[in-house]
Amino acid sequence: MKKVLGFLVFSLLAIVMTTGVGAAANYNIAVVAKDSTSQWVARQGEGIQKFADQTGHNAFQKGPAETDLSAQIQIIRDVMAQGIDALCVVPVDITGIEPVLKEARDEGIVVIVHEGSTVKNKDWAIDAFDNTAFGAFIMDELAAEMGEEGVYTTMVASVTNGSHNQWVDGGIARQKSAYPKMTLLEAAPKNESGDDQERAYEKAKELLKMYPEIKGFQGSSSKDAPGIAKAIEELGLQGKVFVTGVATPIGAKQYIESGSIKAACLWDPGQVGYAMCDLAVKVLDGVKIVEGIDLNEEGYRSIHISDSDPTCLEGNAFMKVTKENVNNYSF
């Protein structure tokens, strides 16, 4: 009997070793970014690679050559064809991305969205913070630079970009409640940059020539503030026109050092790249996502479930880069 039992145990162990039954699963996790060339996306990729190295899961990032919805959709379909278990997406367009995300979910792929909390076809959305509060944070910085008075306008990658418009709306709401001497430019309240620094620069020049009363800009794309700062310098308006918004430390460094950008408001995309993948694995493993859950990365150690949407998660990852600390960052 002992020999029989021993044989059965040995056989069971052999099955487990050869089939993986009972062993921790190794998942294929694709992260599809808005593009493949920006410093922001490169930093996000570092966080994803860190996750892959530390956990053994096959986590990787892809993105289109430029910020383009149709190209992003094609990449999503390409990675779906590779047999992925989870898809993490930073949408170019929150409305246009819906059909392909539905396709992914219909195939049983877990869908995690970043910078797109209003997307419907998702398992979870995760952001670095409450988007409305972040917009207010940016506005507070801009108001301080403008002396809390004067005309301002805003810039987004596109009017269909989810988080950019939430930040702008949060900023406008903050201005209306806290800074009554500031006025939003009614003729052009939201301006599109296409997530392109040169376009942000050209648009800012156009606006400043057409509306010389503009005293401030709130930028949303990581390309907006540097592009606007370039226009401010070229037109000789440094110290008269101000810009605050999202930017990478490296991308904004020359303008921060020259004083054209006083502060860049952001989060570390490497950290959220890691957190997205960690969340995907938890969902795949059947872990219950609850208030305070730890996604094993700074800024995401105690996650808050949004008060307005129980499928949206928020970290606590605000950052501000100034002349004093810009050289502390490598992205």
Image (cartoon, grey):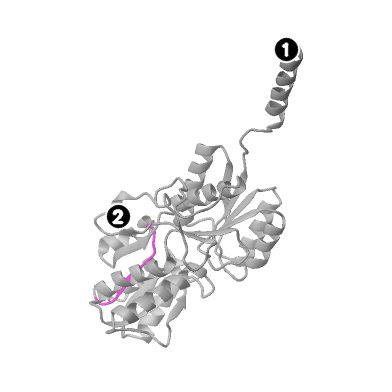
Q: Horizontal placement of 80 versus 291: left or right?
A: right
Which residue has dot 2 on it?
326
Residue 96 appears left or right of 207 = right
Residue 176, by quadrant, is bottom left
Residue 128 pos. (x, y %): 43, 58
- The N terminus lies in which quarter of the figure? top right
Q: Are marks 1 and 2 in contact (CB under 8 Å)?
A: no
At label 1, the amino acid type is: Lys
Q: Is residue 202 visible?
A: no
**Does the magenta run of residues contain 139?**
no
Horizontal side of residue 325 vs 211, given as left or right = left
Residue 43 is situated, as x and y percent measured from the top left of the image, at: 45, 51
Marked residue nearer the N-terminal end (1 or 2): 1
Q: Is residue 2 at all visible to an observer of this figure?
A: yes
Magenta residues (range): 240-248
Q: Find disc 1 in the rendering and name its residue.
A: 2
Find residue 95 and report its horizontal and vertical position in percent: 60, 71
Residue 11 in percent (x, y) is at: 74, 21
Residue 273, above or below 138: above
* CA distance separating discs 1 and 2: 69 Å
Asked which secondary structure carries label 1, the reply is helix
Residue lying farthest to the front in this orientation: 1
Which residue is pictured at 76% across the width and 15% down the height? 4
Place residue 104 in its image quadrant: bottom right
Q: Amino acid at mark 2?
A: Val
Name the residue rendered at 65%, 48% in the picture.
85
